[in-house]
């Protein structure tokens, strides 16, 4: 039998990142019933939610599910608790990147990074660069592009010439996002530090709480004594 030690760390990280509360999930599995990729990985959305509640990092990051999630939002619209599950999947991808836990068989993970780099560099996605970099990264994929590329070109889905977007606006956006992330991480580190070192003041309420039953017991035994005499 597999056992696990529950931890709230992952749920807190997820909540900090996307402002969703994973603990609202009560496992009705409506999200799973509508998910188009639930059958294609070891886990499904409701299991991911439970693993987040229990802080089971490995269970989530050893599975490919979060990288197969298409962000279609079906789960989010179905959830009776109003949880934005798609946002939680995105947040888990961010955590996986940040903590070096990207699944090795997650081609979409590398593609997301290429998309991001292209946005930052050109202010918009330049598909030709994406294809070239993807082909360099995984030569087997070059064969796929050889058959798909010409069709996409003919249909006007990719543009061979570079059209720059607003690179300055993109840089400002990235800078703002990075400073928000740093501030959030600093806040989290401070909270973790405070939690790791309980102050004397924090101990006092517990002491008081522990003392209360004793006082109560003493009082009631006094009452009983009084009644008996
Ligand atoms: S639909 Fe919502 S409440 Fe139901 S299992 Fe999925 S996340 Fe949990
Ligand atoms: S957003 Fe992701 S988890 Fe939700 S239904 Fe779509 S593919 Fe499944």
Image (spheres, rainbow, N blue to C red):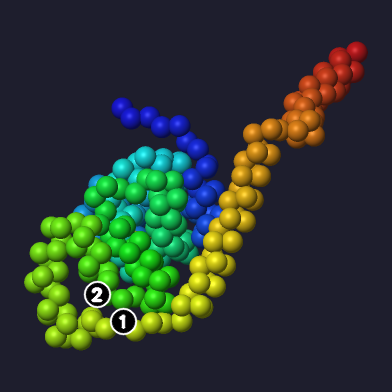
Q: Which residue is mark 2?
A: 128
- Quadrant housing the N terminus: top left
Query: Does residue 104 appear left or right of residue 99 in this picture?
Result: left
Is residue 47 shown to the viewer in this render? no
Q: Secondary structure at mark 2?
A: helix
Picture coordinates of residue 194, whole percent (x, y): 68, 39
Q: Which residue is mark 1?
A: 162
Q: Which mark is residue 3?
A: none
Q: Ligand 2 near label 1 (Cβ, under 8 Å)?
A: no
Seen from the viewer's position, the closer of residues 94 and 48 is 94
- Up-down: is 205 above or below 156? above
Q: Earlier in the sequence, mark 1 or mark 2?
A: 2
- Up-down: is 19 above or below 145? above
The quadrant holding residue 119 is bottom left
Q: Are marks 1 and 2 in contact (CB under 8 Å)?
A: yes
Seen from the viewer's position, the closer of residues 182 and 14 is 182
Is residue 149 shown to the viewer in this render? yes
Residue at coordinates 10% horizontally, 64% vertically from top-left?
A: 143
- Up-down: is 189 above or below 123? above
Q: Circle 1: is it few (<14), some (14-19), or many (20+) Cα within 10 Å?
A: few
Residue at coordinates 14% horizontally, 64% vertically from top-left?
A: 142
Q: Circle 2: is it few (<14), some (14-19), or many (20+) Cα within 10 Å?
A: some
Seen from the viewer's position, the closer of residues 118 and 226 is 118
Query: Does residue 180 appear left or right of residue 228 in this picture?
Result: left
Picture coordinates of residue 163, whole percent (x, y): 34, 84
Picture coordinates of residue 145, whole percent (x, y): 14, 69
Query: Does residue 86 appear left or right of residue 225 in this picture?
Result: left
Residue at coordinates 49% horizontally, 45% vertically from top-left?
A: 10
Residue at coordinates 59% horizontally, 61% vertically from top-left?
A: 179
Q: Secondary structure at mark 1?
A: loop
């Amino acid at each position: 039998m597999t056992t696990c030690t529950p931890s709230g760390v992952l749920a807190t990280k997820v909540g900090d990142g996307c402002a969703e509360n994973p603990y609202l999930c009560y496992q009705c599995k409506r999200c799973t019933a509508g998910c188009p990729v639930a059958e294609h990985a070891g886990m499904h959305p409701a299991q991911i939610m439970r693993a987040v509640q229990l802080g089971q990092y490995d269970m989530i990051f050893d599975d490919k599910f979060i990288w197969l999630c298409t962000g279609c939002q079906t789960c989010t619209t179905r959830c009776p608790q109003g949880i934005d599950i798609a946002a939680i999947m995105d947040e888990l991808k961010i955590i996986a990147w940040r903590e070096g836990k990207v699944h090795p068989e997650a081609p979409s993970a590398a593609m997301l990074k290429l998309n991001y780099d292209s946005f930052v560099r050109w202010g918009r996605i330049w598909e030709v660069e994406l294809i070239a970099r993807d082909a360099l990264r995984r030569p087997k994929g070059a064969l796929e592009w050889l058959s798909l590329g010409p069709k996409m070109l003919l249909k006007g889905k990719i543009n061979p010439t570079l059209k720059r977007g607003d690179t300055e606006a993109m840089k400002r956006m990235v800078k703002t996002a990075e400073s928000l992330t740093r501030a959030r991480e600093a806040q989290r580190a401070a909270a973790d530090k405070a939690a790791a070192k309980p102050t004397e003041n924090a101990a006092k309420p517990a002491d008081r709480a522990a003392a209360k039953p004793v006082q109560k017991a003493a009082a009631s035994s006094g009452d009983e004594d009084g009644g008996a005499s």
